[in-house]
Image (tube, rainbow, N blue to C red):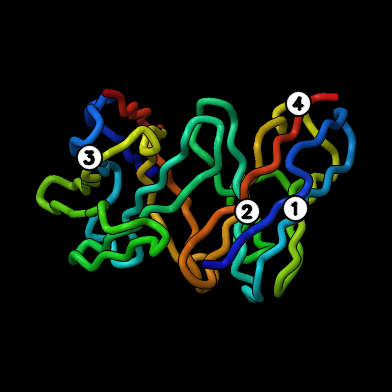
Amino acid sequence: QLQLLESGPRLVKTSQALSLTCTVSRGSINSTDSYWTWIRQPPGKALEWIGYIYFKGATYYSPSLEGRFTISVDTSKSQFSLKVTSVTASDTATYYCARAGDCGGTSCFDHWGQGILVTVSS
Amino acid sequence: DIQMTQSPSSLSASVGDRVTITCRASQSISHYLNWYQQKPGKAPKLLIYGASTLQSGVPSRFSGSGSGTDFTLTISSLQPEDYATYYCQQGYTTLTFGQGTRLDIK
């Protein structure tokens, strides 16, 4: 069973950068039918898709988010990462990494990490 | 972006009840609609994809239907472990989620 695990700092200062890593295990990050995804959820609010990356490096982001988000992949470490620049309190959220697979011709998220709560504070 | 609107935002029901949650898309998304269940402090879990296909391992009391703009998630006989928040997600264009429906014990 594929496993994903988020890691990174849980407290980030306002205006600084937030960097998270997701480690993929019990499966291959080089899978041709997987898109490696970041999703976030502010406390008490709904899920928000940030974007995803293919193992070869192609990225897709939510156009609703301004260009502060960057997703990268390191296949040698079976990891992919998220960087958010110039964070504000509104970036406080639980950040999930997930696998997007093909579900009847579209993307669904069938494997998730446990999530990591990141708080932005001055 | 396509907006996904769930109704109700919350509901209370008893064990054994039949429960229906609705998700409406702001434009047609064909059958590209997925449902997730999220329990407090946990990651979401995929229940249904393609509007009506049950994910492996999900109990058959869960079912989904709809196409175009209107979709439903039905729990035929509510069980204690079903109390959770449910989200729909469209995969037609840029991926977006509904705002969630919280299902509480009555």
Q: Check contact, mark 1 vs mark 4: CB within 8 A.
A: no
Say which element carries label 4. helix
State which tag comes first along the sequence, 1 or 2.
1
Q: Residue A21 carries which label?
A: 3
Give the spatial CA distance, label 2 vs label 3: 26 Å
Q: Is residue A96 above or below residue A8?
A: below
Q: Check contact, mark 2 vs mark 4: CB within 8 A.
A: no
Q: Name the residue under label 2.
A: B88
What amino acid type is highlighted by mark number 3? Thr
Q: Residue at x 26, y 52 (%)?
A: A69
Q: Residue at x 39, y 61 (%)?
A: A62
Q: Position of residue A4 (x, y in %)?
A: 33, 40
Mark 1 vs mark 2, foreground winner is 2
The lab-note entry on whether marks 2 and 4 share a chain reads: yes
What amino acid type is highlighted by mark number 2? Cys
Q: In this view, does B105 lie above or below A18?
A: above
Name the side, left or right, on which B91 lies relative to A62: right
Q: Check contact, mark 1 vs mark 3: CB within 8 A.
A: no
Give the spatial CA distance, label 1 vs label 4: 17 Å
Label 2 neighbour load within 10 Å: few <14, some 14-19, many 20+: many
Say which element carries label 2. strand
Quadrant for the C terminus of chain B in the image: top right
Q: Mark 1 points at which residue?
A: B73
State which tag comes first along the sequence, 1 or 4.
1
Q: In this view, does A10 lie above or below A70?
A: above
Give the spatial CA distance, label 4 vs label 3: 35 Å
Q: Which mark is residue B80?
A: 4
Q: Mark 2, chain letter?
A: B
Q: Position of residue B81 (x, y in %)?
A: 70, 28
Q: Which residue is drawn at 51% across and 26% down?
A: B41
Mark 4 vs mark 3, foreground winner is 3
Q: Using the rendered view, name the quadrant where residue B59 is placed.
A: top right
